[in-house]
């Protein structure tokens, strides 16, 4: 099983339909998509800054923003199916299809996940990968990293990952990879085991519980 987070930066990109098509075509029975928040989450940030409502409400709204993005993806490629539960995800994969995770129900029930903007869809994807015991976590983002291993702490300092990512990957045993917007063409070869992903993230164990 792979957990693939499709970042909000893809939301209005010409690459998004290609990503969805490649995943639907070659990732059936293997992939769970985690949608980013994208422009929907940006509106939540603006509303909170304007009206100053508390982080718990903003957290709930941001999760719903991820769900809006997920529903949009499913509407764009109806070979994909949405689910808000572990059981539903496993049923979709068992049927040989690709699941899109709707996170609100599961996340709001977990006290480990504290409300706040330090936790974004990247950390939630790591949390889901740990919950589902996935074999790989892939983050698809707009920034292209050079091949090789990249410490998570460096990416956090650069603002490319949220501050909770180290903590959410504590106990996660699968490999974490990174793909940029145009790398959807690599998916088939990777799914078939004929190619490995060139960018790997290294979790800083001394920071994981910080």
Image: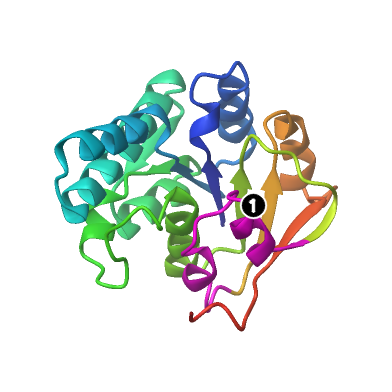
Q: What crowding class fits label 1: few (fewer than 14 Cα within 10 Å), some (14-19), or many (20 or more)? A: few
Q: Position of residue 45 (x, y in %)?
A: 30, 38
Q: Nearer the viewer, residue 147 or 87?
A: 147
Q: Give residue 179's quadrant in the image.
A: top right
State the residue at coordinates (31%, 57%): 116
Q: Quadrant of the N terminus?
A: bottom right
State the residue at coordinates (56%, 32%): 24
Residue 103 horizontal side relative to residue 27, left or right? left
Q: Is residue 147 magenta?
A: no
In the image, the segment drawn in magenta is 150-172
Q: Is residue 156 magenta?
A: yes
- In this figure, which colouring scheme has been used for the structure? rainbow
Q: Is residue 180 above or below residue 124?
A: above
Residue 51 horizontal side relative to residue 183, left or right? left
Q: Is residue 113 above or below residue 198?
A: below
Q: Position of residue 61 (x, y in %)?
A: 22, 42
* Residue with the mark numbered 1: 158
Residue 153 horizontal side relative to residue 196, left or right? left
């Amino acid at each position: 099983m792979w957990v693939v987070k499709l970042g909000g930066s893809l939301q209005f990109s010409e690459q998004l339909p290609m990503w969805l098509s490649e995943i639907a075509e070659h990732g059936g029975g293997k992939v769970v998509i985690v949608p980013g928040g994208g422009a929907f989450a940006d509106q939540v940030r603006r509303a909170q800054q304007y009206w100053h409502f508390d982080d718990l409400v903003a957290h709930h709204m941001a999760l719903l923003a991820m769900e809006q993005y997920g529903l949009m993806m499913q509407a764009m490629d109806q070979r994909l199916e949405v689910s808000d539960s572990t059981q539903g995800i496993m049923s979709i994969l068992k049927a040989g299809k690709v699941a899109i995770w709707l996170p609100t129900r599961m996340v709001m029930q977990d006290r480990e996940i504290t409300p706040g903007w330090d936790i974004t869809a990247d950390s939630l994807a790591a949390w889901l990968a740990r919950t589902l015991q996935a074999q790989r976590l892939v983050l698809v983002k707009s920034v292209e990293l050079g091949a090789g291993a990249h410490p998570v702490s460096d990416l956090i300092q650069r603002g490319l990952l949220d501050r909770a990512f180290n903590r959410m990957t504590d106990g996660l045993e699968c490999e974490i990879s990174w793909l940029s917007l145009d790398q959807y063409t690599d998916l088939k070869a990777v799914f078939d085991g004929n190619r490995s992903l060139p960018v790997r993230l290294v979790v800083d164990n001394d920071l994981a519980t910080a």
